[in-house]
Amino acid sequence: MTRYRGRFAPSPTGPLHFGSLVAAAGSYLDARHQQGEWLLRIEDLDPPREIAGATDSIIRTLEQLGMTWDGPISYQSQRSHLYDEALGRLWQQDYLYDCGCSRKEITDTAVVTETGPVYPGTCRNGLPPGRSPRSVRVRVDPVTGSVRDRLQAPLQQQLASEVGDFIVRRADQLFSYQIAVVVDDAEQQISHVVRGADLLDSTPRQIYLQQLLGLPTPEYLHLPVAVDSKLAKLSKQTFARPVTPDDRHSAIINALRFLRQPLPDPVHDASRDELWQWAIDHWDVTAVPACRTLAAPVEYIEPD
């Protein structure tokens, strides 16, 4: 990968809110500042969580914000054959196995770490008597997963003891985020991943899969996540307000301020396109706070 290729990959679980805008803006500015390509990928991999019309709403909002992407939009729902091929390679390497455990059984018996319950390996050597296959897990070797992030502190994770064998195909037969994002980033030749720090702890799993599949590892930059007054990530579940056409100018300004980027003076006299060009020219990763969360502006938080 000799050319910068970045991407924004939202899930259509609701309209674009401020937290998503921060991730979009950070990835967009990082790509354009380095004269690279910026792709748009819709991660519609989980139909039960999707909201009708959310995909069109996200695309329309990005267009109204003046954020232009390169090439056609890709949709994970149209890429299942690529994920199947990757799982087939892992089966051939004997790195996958069927698991018959329910989520409740694991939660009741597993050791819980910062990344969640650690799978105890119940089905690692074969399904116990009376069990039927539910999900598919990848065997985790006793290795240390390391992430040298461009912003956050270096992360080291003992995959076997802190995560355990993790799911790549769920009990409902849907592919996991971990396998899909690894396959997509490699197939689309993504050189730089810029996204929220809520995904930092899952990055060692993705690097592990990249290594098993012989795929390149992109450079990672995990931005602070916008949180409400209760330190909860802005989301549909926390009633985050969507970004609307009426506030798109202020939304861009607020996103740049959230990322601690310099602004033109006077900022409110700059047009939408002038704002973006200024921000592209002056993009400074070192100015972004190296923390995992930051308080969102109050206007994007639904009051109690």
Image (tube, rainbow, N blue to C red):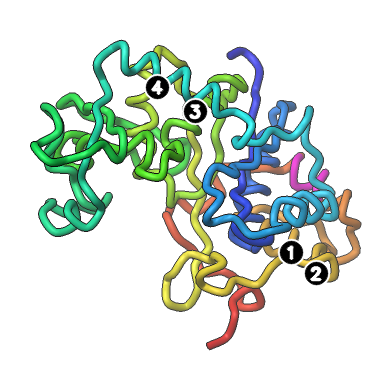
Residue 145 in percent (x, y) is at 27, 30
Label 1 Cα neighbours within 10 Å, binned few <14 / some 14-19 / many ≥20: many
Q: Quadrant of residue 42?
A: top right
Classify residue 250 as left or right of residue 117. Answer: right
Badge number at residue 87: 4
Q: Is residue 240 above or below residue 270?
A: below
Residue to which mark 1 is pinned: 251
Residue to which mark 2 is pinned: 247
Gap in Å between the C-alphas at discs 2 and 3? Answer: 33 Å
Secondary structure at badge 2 equals helix
Labels 1 and 4 touching (C-beta < 8 A): no
Q: Residue at x 78, y 56 (%)?
A: 61
Secondary structure at badge 3 equals strand
Badge number at residue 275: none
Gap in Å between the C-alphas at discs 4 and 2? Answer: 44 Å
Disc with the residue nearer the chain's start (2 vs 3): 3
Q: Quadrant of the N terminus?
A: top right
